[in-house]
Amino acid sequence: MTKKSFSGVVSSFKSDAIAACGETRKAVAIELFKSVILDTPVDEGRLRANWQATTDNPATGQLDIYDENGGGTVALAVKTVNQSNNDQVLYLVNNLPYALAIEYGHSDQAPKGMVRRNMVRISGLIKKAIRENKV
């Protein structure tokens, strides 16, 4: 049995910690994005379909698509998060003009909004992800 040098142990720990933090980052982002998308009220599905996940820069346009159940929108967000690098900023934006009004109570389906209520949950999501990934 060979012993690792102290610097080898530290290097191994560093690599493991970086990998675990990356997995935690992705798990939290996926859960947050999915929750925001699925908490978005649905009339025809355009508001839900316009949640756009991107890296490095937020999306600036609007999409002329509909996604009543949110499955396609969630799948695209998960793909974006999974393909991202640890040094990239993740964004989830909705550029429809009425998204802000819906967020601030103009819908009986989402009186506490979509983003705000899930941001409250973020601390719990982070703690859960840390426990699961043992960071």
Image (cartoon, helix red, strand yellow):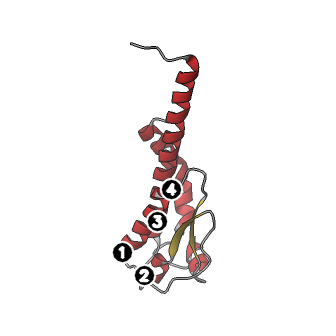
Sequence-wise, which precedes: disc 4 or disc 2?
Answer: 4
**Secondary structure type for disc 3:** helix
At horizontal 57% and vertical 78% (from top left) the residue drawn is 99
Q: Are marks 2 and 1 in contact (CB under 8 Å)?
A: yes
In the current view of this chain or complex, which residue is farthest to the front? 2
Q: Position of residue 12 (x, y in %)?
A: 51, 29
Q: Given contact means CB atoms under 8 Å apart, are the residues at marks 1 and 3 in contact?
A: no
The residue shown at (63%, 67%) is 57
Distance from Cα at disc 1 to Cα at disc 3: 14 Å
- Front-most of residues 32 and 101: 32
Task: Determine crowd level at label 4: few under 14, some 14-19, many 20+ residues with C-alpha closer than 10 A.
Answer: many
Instruction: Residue under label 1, please give it.
Output: 69
Vertically, is 59 above or below 3? below
Q: Amino acid at mark 3?
A: Ala
Residue 115 appears in the figure: yes
Q: Residues within 10 Å of mark 3 (few under 14, many from 20)?
A: many
- First-in-chain label (3 vs 2): 2
Look at 55% across and 65% down and name the residue there: 115
Residue wearing tag 3: 77
